[in-house]
Amino acid sequence: VRLVSELGDATHVGGRLAAIDLPGVGSDGRVAFRGEVLDGKTGQAVFVDTGGGAVAIAKAGRPAPGAGRYRDFPETVGNGAASVDVAGVRVAFLASLYDTNAFEGIFLKNKGKHGGKSLARTNKHAPGGGKYVSVDVPSVLDGGHYAFSGLVRDDSTRQAIFWRDGRKRRIVVRQGLDTGTRIAGRFQAFLPPDLAAAGLIFRAQVSPVGQDGLFLALETRRGLLVAAGDKSDESDVFRAFDRPAPGDHDAAARPAGHAGAPGRGRQGACRSA
């Protein structure tokens, strides 16, 4: 085990680390995180571990890829996920913006390289119609393969999941669509998806019953992996699920869930077969 950074560490942008968000970890062990800096040249930054200390690759107040400047880097709230995603030397993150008509965007940067890539921005057209109102931290394999959830406004405002599979960006699922699975109902809400070489996995809540399920998307197909109420291999009953977590970006996704037999309520992590 190697310590990457800790509160109070001096940074390459001056000052010291005053806060560290939950880090993202790549399949090769590379670590990146959102950090707040006290008495530095910037108040917030996205840092990546170089083996010789953490280096800021995106800084509040600096130009963002495309247009505008980074205002800050929002921390992830409520779903226990990292504020950044790591794929090889690439780091993906969410940023609030100013000096542009986009309120926020998601970006991909390479360690040690200037510039970067804008993956999606609010106020831009979304696949399937409408414009992005908000976007979440993406899950990334590389510059041409990534997925994210967001709110889109056309005649109404709906949540949806988007996936670029190397060719073009497309919509995978949106709020209000029929699930087309043994869970009868329509998709009501999603947690941000996770992308692996085997496909895209996401947790969704289905209305009108409010039932949780983990779903897998493969190219243009979509199916149910496991639902609340299903039995585990140990005959416990799944009650609800967290955001799924891939084992790494080259392996099948591993859904993490809460399993409990009646009266026991155990929590556990489960791997898809």
Image (spheres, rainbow, N blue to C red):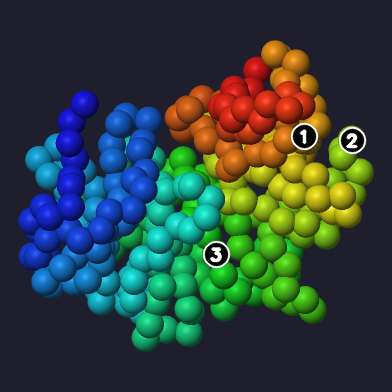
Point out the image quarter for the N terminus: top left
> What residue do we see at 62% from left, 33% from top?
257
Answer yes or no: is residue 169 visible.
no
Query: Amino acid type of disc 1?
Result: Ala
Q: What secondary structure is marked by label 2?
A: loop
Rounded to the nearest angstrom, the CA distance separating label 3 from label 2 is 29 Å
Crowd around label 3: few <14 · some 14–19 · many ≥20 (10 Å): many
Residue at 52%, 55% (x, y): give it. Answer: 78
Relative to 191, is 105 above or below?
below
Q: Nearer the viewer, mark 2 or mark 1?
A: 1
Q: Which residue is mark 1?
A: 227
Name the residue carrying label 3: 135
Which one is in front in this view, the residue at disc 3 or the one at disc 2?
A: 2
- Percent position (x, y) of residue 48? 24, 48
Q: Which residue is mark 2?
A: 182
Of residues 115 and 107, the one nearer the viewer is: 107
Position of residue 185 measured from the top left corner of the image (x, y, whole percent) = 89, 49
Query: Where 154 sits versus 140, above or below?
Result: below
In contact (CB < 8 Å): disc 2 and disc 1: yes
Tell me how far mark 2 sits from mark 1, CA to CA: 9 Å
Task: Give how far across and how far down residue 103 sits, in percent.
Answer: 48, 78
